[in-house]
Image: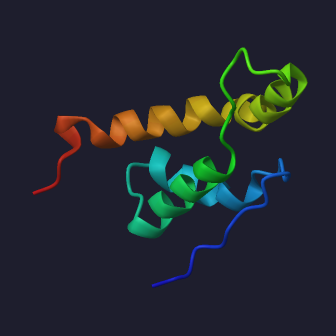
């Protein structure tokens, strides 16, 4: 199994997961794609609103807002997990 590389929290470059998003959007992600997306998500958490450092929260959101990353990942997951997509 291919090893999943950790992502730098400061890095806003999403190019490392573009192939994973494409596989998910096409409805054919494998366990490595899903694991990379989960690891990336874990490394790019957004702090809760109302915490002292609002500028930091805005910076953390950039990775998910730019290039509609959150929308694309969520849409891919919803389409992949719909019951009609269950494979026999």
At horizontal 34% and vertical 43% (from top left) the residue drawn is 80
Instruction: Please identify the quadrant where the N terminus is shown.
Output: bottom left
Q: To which quarter of the image does residue 4 belong?
A: bottom right
Seen as rendered, the residue at the extreme bottom is: 1
Relative side of 44 to 36, left or right: right
Display coloring:
rainbow
| Residue placed most toward the observer, 28 or 10 | 10
**Please, is residue 83 above or below residue 3 in the view?**
above
Q: Position of residue 47 (x, y in %)?
A: 69, 31
Relative side of 25 to 86, left or right: right
Seen as rendered, the residue at the extreme top is: 50
Seen as rendered, the residue at the extreme left is: 88
**Please, is residue 10 above or below residue 65 in the view?**
below
Relative side of 59 to 15, left or right: right
Seen as rendered, the residue at the extreme right is: 55
**Please, is residue 71 above or below residue 45 in the view?**
above
| Residue placed most toward the observer, 19 or 34 | 34
Q: To which quarter of the image does residue 82 belong?
A: top left
Q: How many marks?
A: 0
Instruction: Please identify the quadrant where the C terminus is shown.
Output: bottom left
Q: Position of residue 23 (x, y in %)?
A: 49, 56
| Residue placed most toward the observer, 79 or 35 | 35
**Please, is residue 8 above or below residue 83 in the view?**
below
At horizontal 82% and vertical 21% (from top left) the residue drawn is 52
Relative side of 52 to 74, left or right: right
Q: To which quarter of the image does residue 40 belong?
A: bottom right
Q: Position of residue 31 (x, y in %)?
A: 40, 66
């Amino acid at each position: 199994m291919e090893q999943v590389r950790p992502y730098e929290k400061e890095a806003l470059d999403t190019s490392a997961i573009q192939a994973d998003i494409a596989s998910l959007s096409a409805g054919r992600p494998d366990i490595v794609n899903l694991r990379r997306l989960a690891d990336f998500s874990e490394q790019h958490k957004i702090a809760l609103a109302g915490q002292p450092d609002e500028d930091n929260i805005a910076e953390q959101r950039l990775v998910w807002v730019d290039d509609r990353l959150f929308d694309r990942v969520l849409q891919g997951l919803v389409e992949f997990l719909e019951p009609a997509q269950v494979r026999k």
